Image (spheres, grey):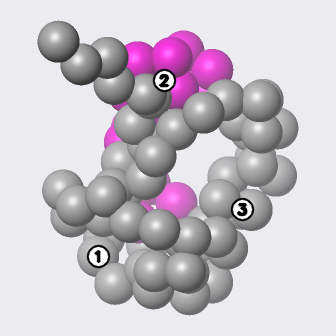
Amino acid sequence: MNLTIKYFGLIAEATNCSEEQMEFFGKTVLELKEQLFQKYPVLKLKDFQIAQNNELVENETEITGIEIALLPPFAGG
């Protein structure tokens, strides 16, 4: 499955890109994280959440959408 991965804030700085296309062969968010950690080992040190089609998802969630976003922690106000 071909995914569009969007990176925001400190995550974009860590990966040195804001968006890319990636071929994904797994099924879950956890498997996607593992693939991203292989490509960008620095992400293992970062705190972030993953959104699929504009909804935050958990590690066990199946990847069904083609747009994924890696979001840094938010500060509330």
Q: Report which quarter residue 27 is drawn in.
A: bottom right
At horizontal 52% and vertical 60% (from top left) the residue drawn is 22
Q: Which residue is mark 3?
A: 35
Question: Which circle's residue, 1 or 2, is located before the other in the chain?
Answer: 2
In the depicted structure, whether residue 34 falls above or below residue 12:
below
Question: Which circle's residue, 3 or 1, is located before the other in the chain?
Answer: 3
At horizontal 70% and vertical 35% (from top left) the residue drawn is 43
Work out whether residue 18 can be spotted: no
How many residues crowd around disc 2 within 10 Å: few (fewer than 14), some, or many (20 or more)? some
**Residue 15, image x, y percentages:** 61, 27
- Give the residues in magenta: 3-23
Mark linked to residue 65: 1
Check if mark 3's residue and mark 1's residue have beta carbons within 8 Å.
no
At horizontal 64% and vertical 70% (from top left) the residue drawn is 30
Amino acid type, residue under disc 1 in the picture: Gly
Q: Nearer the viewer, residue 74 or 34?
A: 74
Task: Determine the secondary structure under disc 2.
Answer: helix
Task: Determine the secondary structure under disc 1.
Answer: loop
Q: Look at the image and say whether residue 4 sits in the magenta stretch.
A: yes
Per the model, the C-alpha gap separating discs 1 and 2 is 21 Å
Q: Look at the image and say whether residue 63 sits in the magenta stretch.
A: no
Q: Is residue 75 left or right of residue 27?
A: left
At horizontal 56% and vertical 70% (from top left) the residue drawn is 59
Q: Is residue 13 left or right of residue 63?
A: right
Mark linked to residue 12: 2
